Structure formats: C-alpha cells, structure tokens
C-alpha cells in the first residue's frame, strides 16, 4: 500500500510514536548488541537516534509504503513464515534500491506493527486476511550524501560448511 493522504499519514505516525515509546521502554525487539564492543554500541546508538528522529518527524514524510502479505503467518511454522516473507522482502528491497537511484531515502521500519490492527483500520486493510510486514517512509534526501554503512569483516559473519559458535 502506498499512503500519501495527510490524515492517514498523521494517524500512522501517531501509531509509530506509540510503538516507539513501547520499544524504548520495553526493548521488545532490540537486537542483541555485543555489550563489550564500544563500536557496536555506538552504531546502535546512531540507529536509535535516527529512529527517534523519524518518530518525531514521521508525519512530515510525504509517502509511506506498507508492504503486505495476503495471509497471516502469526501462528505458522518458520517454514511458512520464511516462505511468505521470501515473497515480499526481495520486492521491497528492489523498491528501496530503485528509490535510492532516484535520490529518495527509505528505511525498513516495523515499529508501527505493535499497533498493526489499528493501522489496518486506518488503511481499510482486512486484518484477518492481510498482514502488514513493514512501513517504508520515502522522502527526498537532504543534507550530506549517504555513506556506505558499516559492515563487519566477512570472516566474522560467513560460516563455511559448519556453524562456528
Ligand atoms: C530511521 C530508521 C528507523 C528504523 N526503524 C526500524 C524498525 O522500526 N524496525 C527494525 O527492525 N529496524 C529498524 N531500523 C533498522 C533498519 O531496518 C536496518 O536494520 C538498519 O538500518 C541496519 O541496516 P544497514 O546496516 O543496512 O543500515 C531503522 C533504521 C533507521 C535508520
């Protein structure tokens, strides 16, 4: 779904802000960060501060894209969930790359899903049949141009033939 209507965008932004409050107070989806690694902590801090900025400004973002799956996987096995997400993730990533090629910024966000049912009501989505998987704010880039994101050395993240602990 592509959302451009100002009233609906403002309502989604409000849900995102409520989700954000819950995220910071309960830390429900926080990714595990190696506490001993100050660089990792600093990176996580930067992402958190970007996300906080987004929470404060989301209503100003002109386009919100909400990718959906025409089923619900809440109660399904990993194989079903992975297969369904496999149908949507490559399409959304292609969209994000295409946006980037046109000087549009995007981010994969999920925090509004704390209140997915309310978002479904705002957007007229039949909640029992259609699952929202993300919300991608789309806006023109301002300020400095983008830099490549930090990537850990391949040796740390690639496993050959057998999982290393
Ligand atoms: C503004 C902003 C908001 C984000 N919001 C979420 C979120 O709601 N849920 C989530 O799982 N990740 C969120 N992320 C994290 C990104 O989806 C992504 O995992 C992160 O930017 C690391 O990917 P990268 O190394 O390719 O940049 C957010 C990132 C940014 C910059």
Image (cartoon, helix red, strand yellow):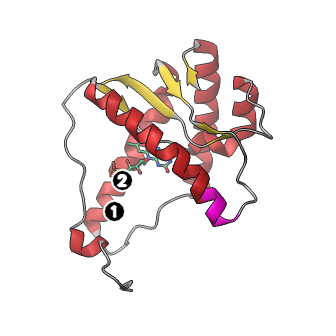
Q: x, y (%) of residue 15? A: 64, 34
> Looking at this rendering, what residue extends furthest in the right direction?
128
Question: Can you see residue 20?
Answer: no
Which residue is pictured at 42% across the width and 26% down the height? 138
Principal secondary structure, stretch drawn in magenta: helix
Depicted 129 relative to depicted 143: above or below: below
Q: x, y (%) of residue 17? A: 58, 36
Depicted 103 relative to depicted 45: above or below: above
> Does label 2 point to a residue whose CB lies under 8 Å from ligand 1?
no
Depicted 76 relative to depicted 157: above or below: above
Label 1 environment density (alpha carbons within 10 Å; few <14, some 14–19, many ≥20): some
Label 2 environment density (alpha carbons within 10 Å; few <14, some 14–19, many ≥20): few
Question: Can you see residue 4?
Answer: yes
Which residue is pictured at 28% across the width and 67% down the height? 38
Secondary element at image label 1: helix
Q: Nearer the viewer, residue 98 or 52?
A: 98
Q: Does the magenta-highlighted stretch encompass residue 8?
A: no
- Circle 2 residue: 45
Report the Cα–Cα distance between label 2 and label 1. 6 Å
Which label number is shown at residue 81?
none
Q: Which residues are magenta?
A: 77-81
In the rendered structure, the answer to whether residue 74 lies left or right of residue 58 reads right
Q: x, y (%) of residue 83? A: 58, 56
- Circle 1 residue: 41
Task: Say if mark 2 contacts mark 1, CB within 8 Å.
Answer: yes
Secondary element at image label 2: helix
* Among the 4 quarters of the image, the one containing residue 144: top left
Q: Nearer the viewer, residue 38 or 15?
A: 15
Which residue is pictured at 63% across the width and 14% down the height? 7
Which residue is pictured at 38% across the width and 23% down the height? 139
């Amino acid at each position: 779904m592509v959302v451009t209507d100002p009233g609906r965008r403002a309502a989604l932004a409000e849900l995102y802000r409520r989700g954000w409050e819950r995220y910071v107070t309960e830390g429900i989806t926080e990714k595990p960060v190696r506490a001993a690694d100050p660089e990792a902590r600093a990176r996580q801090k930067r992402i958190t501060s970007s996300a906080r900025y987004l929470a404060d400004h989301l209503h100003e973002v002109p386009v919100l894209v909400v990718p959906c799956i025409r089923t619900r996987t809440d109660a399904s096995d990993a194989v079903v969930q992975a297969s369904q997400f496999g149908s949507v993730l490559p399409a959304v990533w292609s969209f994000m790359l295409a946006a980037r090629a046109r000087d549009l910024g995007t981010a994969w966000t999920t925090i509004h899903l704390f209140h997915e049912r309310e978002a479904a009501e705002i957007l007229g989505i039949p909640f029992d049949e259609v699952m929202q998987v993300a919300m991608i704010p789309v806006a023109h880039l301002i300020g400095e141009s983008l830099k490549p994101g930090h990537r850990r050395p391949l040796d740390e993240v690639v496993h050959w033939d057998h999982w290393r602990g």
